């Protein structure tokens, strides 16, 4: 049976290892070599984009893994530690706002994903990627639209990427006070827009993003 390169499913689904098991069986590779990949931070006006890759241990799964957006802050923090401790391999990579500006957010995201896999302590036989564009990897990669609702490995990666990026933005709040990075994490909230207009862009703002570029142009004029 041919395996589709992209899978779409109901967002109501809860993540489990069904997809990983099906792919592993059909490609005849061990389940312990299936990697999940996800990113965090494509949309914000400031800060890096983060990507994580995770190879879960099917015999030692952390309890409560779900799409990071459906978990509380406390749940994500707890699972962040548990996933790193119990997974067979995990990796997190960030690409800076400056590199996002010099290339574009898609290229920066795909680079972060590829590096996250490259940095794993053991290389996967196949990868499941959240979204519709896979990075270039040394193994087969299959896209799963909304995969963090279905694939446990992708959901685990979504937690690692989000928590790691959120912590970076909390640190940025101390380095660049006044923008509210600890609260909105760089996303385009009203408070962020008001701070951006009042203070101007800081070194971690994505100058290629239209709302930031507009404020910068106004200040320069």
Image (spheres, grey):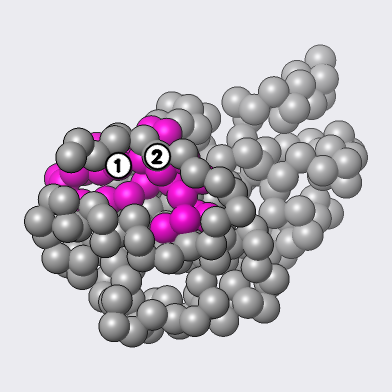
- Residue toward you, 172 or 134: 134
Residue 140 image offset from top left, x and y in percent: 19, 43
Which residue ends up furthest to the front in the rendered image?
A: 1
Which residue: 73% across, 37% down? 201
Q: Looking at the image, is 93 positioned above or below residue 91? A: above
Q: Which residue is mark 1?
A: 142
Measure the C-alpha gap from mark 2 to mark 1.
8 Å
Q: Which residues fall within the magenta stretch?
A: 126-151
Q: From the viewer's perspective, is residue 153 above or below residue 37?
A: below
**Residue 171, can we see it?**
no
Q: Quadrant of the C terminus?
A: top right
Element under label 1? Answer: strand
The correct choice, above or below, for 119 with respect to 46 in the image is: below
Q: Residue at x 72, y 30 (%)?
A: 212
Furthest residue toward left: 28
Residue 53: say if magenta.
no
Relative to 142, 194 lies left or right: right
Q: Residue at x 59, y 72 (%)?
A: 76
Query: On the picture, is 37 further left or further right than 127?
Result: right
> Could you classify mark 1 by the number of other residues whose Cα lies within 10 Å: few (under 14), some (14-19), or many (20 or more)?
many
Residue 16 shows up from this direction: yes
Asked if the residues shown at circle 2 and circle 1 are in contact, with their CB atoms under 8 angstroms apart, the answer is yes
**Residue corresponding to mark 2:** 7
Mark 2 vs mark 1: give the one in front.
2
Q: Quadrant of residue 131?
A: top left
- x 16%, y 51%: residue: 26
């Amino acid at each position: 049976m041919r395996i589709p390169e992209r899978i779409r499913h109901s967002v109501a689904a809860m993540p489990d290892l069904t997809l990983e098991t099906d792919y592993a069986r059909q490609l005849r590779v061990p389940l312990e070599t299936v990697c999940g990949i996800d990113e965090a931070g494509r949309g914000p006006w400031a800060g890096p984009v983060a990507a994580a890759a995770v190879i879960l241990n099917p015999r030692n799964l952390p309890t409560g893994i779900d799409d990071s957006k459906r978990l509380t802050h406390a749940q994500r923090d707890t699972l962040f530690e548990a996933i790193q401790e119990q997974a067979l391999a995990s990796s997190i990579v960030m690409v800076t706002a400056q590199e996002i500006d010099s290339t574009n957010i898609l290229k920066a995201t795909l680079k972060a994903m590829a590096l996250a896999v490259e940095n794993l302590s053991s290389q996967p036989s196949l990868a499941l990627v959240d979204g519709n564009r896979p990075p270039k990897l040394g193994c087969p990669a299959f896209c799963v639209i909304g995969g963090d609702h279905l694939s446990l490995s992708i959901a685990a990666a979504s937690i690692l990427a989000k928590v790691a990026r959120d912590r970076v933005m909390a640190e940025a709040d101390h380095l660049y006070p006044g923008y509210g990075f600890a609260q909105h994490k760089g996303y385009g909230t009203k408070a962020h827009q008001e701070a951006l207009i009042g203070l101007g862009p800081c070194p971690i703002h994505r100058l290629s993003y239209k709302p930031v570029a507009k404020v910068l142009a106004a200040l320069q004029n």
